[in-house]
Image (spheres, rainbow, N blue to C red):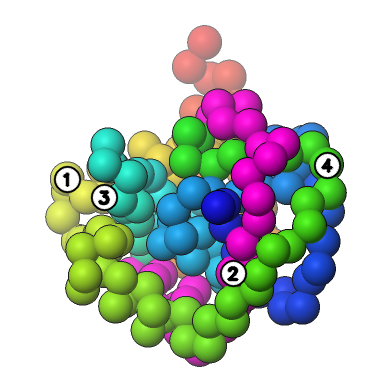
């Protein structure tokens, strides 16, 4: 059984859609808790998400209180799907499987309190949450992640249109833009 999690309820068929991989896929995971992390809209500028070797999902906040801001007062639907047609290792994150075809939903489970459920999963040891720390070591990890994503997604131009960039990443973006003007060559 695989899981696809969405803020949209009532789906009977999951249809491929284009995401950051620029190819239409239906995305699924084999770990329900990992799937729950996708029950509310967010992106790589909110969290750094990975999995430990034992499959336990790990989440790092990219800014203070990101976990609460993103998941509090949110609900979602967990869609159970058959694993037929899903491929592992196609995209750069091994926890995620993809299918190029429409996928029928086997069962839908409604999660009314996503924040509460994720917090409970962390208490049970099924999720590791790294709250934002004002330490040089933590900020270095997040800065490397953010710089990678800014360049990879060509997102330097979002400074004026994304409030997170203004609040949390403005100095990083301005520094990157200043070294990209050619004066160091």
The residue that mark 4 highlights is 101
CA neighbours of label 3 inside 10 A, class few (<14), some (14 to 19), many (20+): some
Report x, y in % for residue 163: 58, 68
Report x, y in % for residue 104: 78, 57
* Nearest to viewer (mark 2 / mark 3): 2
Report x, y in % for residue 19: 73, 46
* Nearest to viewer (mark 1 / mark 4): 4
Q: Secondary structure at mark 2?
A: strand
Q: Please tell me how many numbered marks the rendered image carries.
A: 4
State the residue in front, 115 or 161. 115
Q: Is residue 59 visible?
A: yes
Q: Secondary structure at mark 4?
A: loop
In space, the residues marked 1 and 4 are separated at their CA atoms by 43 Å
Tell me whether the residue at label 1 lies in contact with that at label 4, contact meaning CB atoms closer than 8 angstroms.
no
Q: Label for residue 78?
A: 2
The residue drawn where x is 72% and y is 78% is 9
Locate residue 92: give its quadrant.
top right
Q: Secondary structure at mark 1?
A: helix
* Nearest to viewer (mark 4 / mark 3): 4
Q: Which residues are magenta?
A: 64-92
In space, the residues marked 4 and 3 are separated at their CA atoms by 40 Å
The residue that mark 3 highlights is 139
Q: Secondary structure at mark 3?
A: helix
State the residue in front, 179 or 1. 1
Tell me whether the residue at label 3 lies in contact with that at label 1, contact meaning CB atoms closer than 8 angstroms.
yes
CA neighbours of label 4 inside 10 A, class few (<14), some (14 to 19), many (20+): some
Q: Label for residue 161?
A: none
């Amino acid at each position: 059984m695989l899981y696809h999690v969405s803020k949209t309820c009532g789906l009977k068929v999951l249809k491929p859609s284009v995401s950051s991989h620029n190819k239409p896929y239906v995305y699924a995971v084999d770990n329900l808790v990992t799937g729950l992390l996708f029950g509310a809209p967010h992106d790589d500028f909110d969290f750094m998400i990975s999995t430990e070797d034992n499959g336990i999902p790990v989440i790092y906040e990219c800014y203070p209180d990101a976990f609460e801001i993103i998941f509090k007062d949110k609900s979602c639907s967990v869609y159970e799907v058959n694993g037929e047609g899903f491929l592992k290792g196609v995209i750069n994150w091994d926890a995620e499987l993809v299918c190029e075809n429409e996928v029928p939903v086997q069962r839908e489970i409604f999660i009314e309190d996503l924040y509460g459920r994720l917090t409970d999963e962390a208490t049970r040891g099924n999720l590791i949450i790294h709250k934002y720390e004002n330490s040089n070591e933590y900020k270095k990890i997040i800065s490397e992640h953010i710089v990678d994503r800014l360049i990879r997604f060509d997102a330097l131009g979002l400074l004026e249109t994304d409030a997170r960039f203004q609040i949390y990443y403005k100095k990083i973006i301005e520094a990157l833009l200043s070294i990209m003007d050619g004066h160091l060559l």
